[in-house]
Amino acid sequence: MAQIILISTMRCNFNKEIRMEKMNVKPATGKLGVLCVGLGAVTSTFMTGVLMARKGLAKPVGSMTQYDKMRVGRGENKKYLHYGEIVPLANLNDIIFGAWDVYPANAYESAVNAEVLQEKDTNPVKDELVKIVPMKAAFDHNYASRLDGDNVKDCKNRWDMMEQVREDIRKFKAENNCERIVVLWAASTEIYVPVNEAVHGTLAALEQAMKNDDKEHIAPSMCYAYAALSEGAPFIMGAPNTTVDIPAMWELAEKTKMPIAGKDFKTGQTLVKSGFAPIIGTRCLGLSGWFSTNILGNRDGLVLDEPANFRTKEVSKLSTLESILVPEDQPDLYTDYYHKVRINYYPPRNDSKEGWDNIDIFGWMGYPMQIKINFLCRDSILAAPLCLDLVLLSDLAARAGRFGIQRFLSFFLKSPMHDYVENEIPVNHLFQQYAILKNAIREMGGYEADQEID
């Protein structure tokens, strides 16, 4: 299973990730519409931060596109540049926000209700936030039973649901004079939808299921994704929903020549896991067990308190470790270790999520040791810069002619999309993901993609 991978060679059977010898990246002209599915804590924090940053009243800390520098060139030609100096990223001043939500509260009211940000950080942009009023959501209560909002579309079937979202995108784009649109899912986790080959295997089958109103296999999020791609908008899945992680959506992304990315923002515990597990592996220490538990009290925690919704999240979080510490590579060290993940709803904590990890390892001659990690973080504060980076880089990918699964965005996501039909192994190792990210940006900027991952 040991691999040496150069990102530009990571393509699937129908060229879902395109490479050109010389990237012809279109400039980031005009307005960029950012349509967010969900106007809760994460989205209102994201919007507020961008609006404050472009007024010079806050810093976009945590955003790779705004802060990170990377090497381009080698030897005497080597230099370190910000992403925006290498590739043409959209300017923050050109972003126009819109949203859908089951609750009618505008972005300012949502930010106040979420209690993530203080008044001093929302009031300077209150006038702009108040104008961001959510459109009616494409929603099925069976997919998120803990939500009870009534700002919901009346849909005849799943196909009609999708068509109404398409109309929303077209109307928003026209009314706000946007040149481009990106659609970002920052809403709650839906119940788990297993991949069904008969429904999700081809685009034709998916479309027929939508027209047949197959509510069991077609989640509302799939209607958003289909609508976005059909309207020429990249789609980003920020939750662990199945949604675009199916062959039918890959086929649609190829047909529409649009990028897709997902799944699940890599914010707290999984960020730690994807960065710390490589320490154990690189040091050739053994692993007996890794127990992870989380407590959080925001709307996401409320939804995940429902077992059917938690199952979707569990699948996403469990996948991280198994592709980093691989039994086939090191049978003496990683055979039969126990990995458990729990999420507990705890209202008093609100958006201040706590991720606690107990790691049982063993060393020389098999002697046991333990590692304890307690990450007291703020869920939306960590997610907001990921939203910005995913939006800007997905827009960049579309202008560069890249379409289908964007593996270079795996750095920002818990459970990277991959072609499981072709038995592709996802890259979860944080520092390998970082190399892939940098290579893609180098390539789109006209530089050599010169980093390998082992």
Image (cartoon, rainbow, N blue to C red):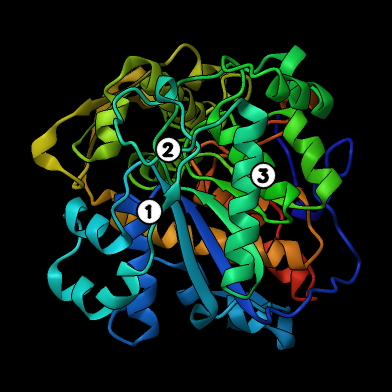
Q: Are marks 2 and 1 in contact (CB under 8 Å)?
A: no
Q: In the rendered view, would you say 439 is above or below 383?
A: below
User: Which sits in the foreground, 34 or 287?
Assistant: 34
First in sequence: mark 3 vs mark 1:
3
Q: Is residue 147 left or right of residue 263?
A: left
Q: In the rendered view, would you say 303 is above or below 28?
A: above
Answer yes or no: is residue 228 visible.
yes
Residue lying farthest left? 348
Q: Which residue in the protein does label 1 denote?
A: 383
Q: Badge 3, how many Cα within 10 Å: few under 14, some, many 20+? A: many
Type of amino acid under label 1: Ala
**Which secondary structure lies at badge 1?**
helix
**Which secondary structure lies at badge 3?**
helix
Q: Which residue in the protein does label 2 denote?
A: 152
Q: Nearer the viewer, mark 3 or mark 1?
A: 3
Query: Residue 334: x, y in percent?
Result: 49, 20
Type of amino acid under label 3: Ala
Query: Residue 294: x, y in percent?
Result: 24, 32
Query: Residue 365: x, y in percent?
Result: 38, 20
Query: Residue 226: x, y in percent?
Result: 68, 40
Q: In the rendered view, would you say 99 is above or below 74?
A: above
Kindly identify which numbered label has been placed on residue 227. 3
Q: Badge 1, how many Cα within 10 Å: few under 14, some, many 20+? A: many
